[in-house]
Image: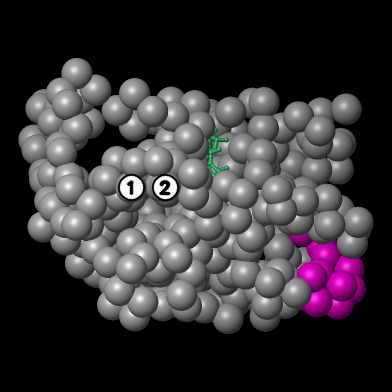
């Protein structure tokens, strides 16, 4: 049986839900102009983005991987949260028992005001910096853009009708000497790398324990799955964990394949998270009018939200 698609039914569920969990992925930030990892936008130069996100790739070509992450950091610093980030942040402020697990490293949920106590960054942050040699050095919220002069080609801005030379696979990648990359100020030997979790690396154990403890506290009413292919463990396994705790699953994604496996009591909303999430949460957060600057004002003023939305599918 196909999942439900009724916004009205979903609004009733979210209004009455106490414990809500969410799993967020790169699709949430797509409307902010940030590329996803898989599918369209998943290629960087002629590399699969995912093939650059490994310790082995960094070891083999630290300059290339550093350029890739310097570019992603530049993009993240330029990006603004979209209405989807704001809607989730507002929901978190209004629902005491809402835990949001984000696979995104772009910092946009925090920028939208998502309470930190209700947000877990499963895959770290692109703004953090650590030592590749694991000497223990960590720097939080480093806003340097570019991270060092050698990586400047990753931070250039070009008009939309021109291809940035770094992104053109027909142009050679800039030659960068190892000594021109950032080295750890603590151990002096290791190269600095982004504070993100790469394939094959472990997630922060304390954070995982804390999430497990939250899940085990009791019944989960609703599991939101937003903008993710849910292809990576352990992130994707939280959907199953929530189901084990009784959760109805609601997927928000433009890709119809992302509804595979949903049951008839689950929900599927096909489309952009930036457009759909504000509509789904209107009963709790009030009306967002699409102008992010005015959202917080209109939300706090609102008492009885009218039923004015229809899904833009
Ligand atoms: N709104 C909602 N979803 C969208 C939108 C949008 N505007 N645009 C695209 N999507 C969906 C795509 O259909 C796809 O299902 O977002 C999803 C993006 O999937 P991935 O690129 O696989 O990103 P994600 O699931 O976050 O990847 C998980 O894998 O590469 C690693 O560590 C990396 O955190 C990342 C993890």
Residue 312 locus on image (x, y percent): 49, 34
| Residue 132 visible at all | yes
Nearest the viewer among 60 and 137 is 60
Q: Which mark is residue 62?
A: 1
Label 1 lies in ligand 1 vicinity (Cβ under 8 Å): no
Image quadrant assignment for residue 193: bottom left
Q: Residue at x 29, y 41 (%)?
A: 64
Residue 157 locus on image (x, y percent): 11, 44
Q: Which residues are magenta?
A: 212-222
Nearest the viewer among 241 and 190 is 190
Q: Residue furthest front?
A: 189
Residue 258 locus on image (x, y percent): 67, 32
Label 2 lies in ligand 1 vicinity (Cβ under 8 Å): no
Q: Residue at x 27, y 45 (%)?
A: 63
Residue 104 vertical position relative to residue 174 in the rendered view, above or below: below
Whether pointer 2 and pointer 1 mark residues with C-beta atoms closer than 8 Å, the reply is yes
Nearest the viewer among 253 and 282 is 253
Kind of element beneath mark 1: helix
Image quadrant assignment for residue 190: bottom left
Image quadrant assignment for residue 246: bottom right
Q: Residue at x 58, y 81 (%)?
A: 117
Q: Is residue 221 magenta?
A: yes
Q: Which residue is mark 2?
A: 59
Crowd class of label 1 (few under 14; some 14 to 19; many from 20; radius 10 Å): many
In the image, is 17 to the left or to the right of 118? right
Crowd class of label 2 (few under 14; some 14 to 19; many from 20; radius 10 Å): few
Q: Residue at x 61, y 49 (%)?
A: 200
């Amino acid at each position: 049986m196909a999942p439900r698609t009724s916004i009205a039914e979903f609004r009733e569920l979210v209004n009455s839900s106490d414990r809500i969990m969410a799993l967020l992925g790169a699709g949430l930030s797509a409307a902010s102009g940030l590329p996803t990892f898989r599918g369209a936008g998943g290629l960087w130069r002629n590399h699969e983005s995912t093939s650059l996100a490994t310790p082995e790739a960094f070891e083999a070509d630290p300059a290339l991987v550093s350029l890739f992450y310097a570019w992603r950091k530049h993009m993240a610093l330029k990006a603004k949260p979209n209405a989807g980030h704001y809607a989730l942040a507002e929901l978190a402020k209004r629902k005491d028992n809402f835990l949001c697990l984000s696979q995104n490293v772009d910092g946009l949920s925090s920028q939208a005001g998502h309470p930190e106590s209700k947000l877990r960054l499963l895959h770290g942050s692109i703004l953090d910096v650590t030592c590749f040699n694991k000497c223990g050095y960590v720097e939080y919220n480093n806003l340097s853009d570019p991270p060092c002069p050698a990586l400047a080609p990753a931070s250039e801005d070009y008009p939309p009708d021109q291809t940035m030379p770094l992104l053109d696979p027909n142009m050679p990648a800039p030659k960068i000497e190892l000594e021109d990359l950032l080295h750890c100020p603590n151990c002096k030997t290791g190269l600095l790398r982004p504070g993100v979790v790469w394939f094959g690396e472990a997630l922060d154990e304390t954070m995982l324990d804390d999430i497990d403890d939250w899940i085990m506290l009791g019944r989960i009413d609703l599991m939101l799955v937003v903008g993710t292919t849910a292809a990576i463990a352990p992130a994707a396994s939280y959907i199953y964990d929530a189901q084990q705790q009784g959760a109805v699953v609601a997927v928000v994604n433009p890709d119809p394949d992302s509804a595979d496996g949903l049951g008839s009591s689950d929900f599927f909303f096909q489309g952009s998270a930036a457009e759909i999430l504000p509509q789904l949460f209107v009963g709790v957060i009030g009306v967002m009018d699409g102008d992010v600057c005015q959202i917080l004002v209109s939300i706090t003023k609102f008492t009885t939200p009218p039923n004015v939305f229809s899904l833009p599918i």
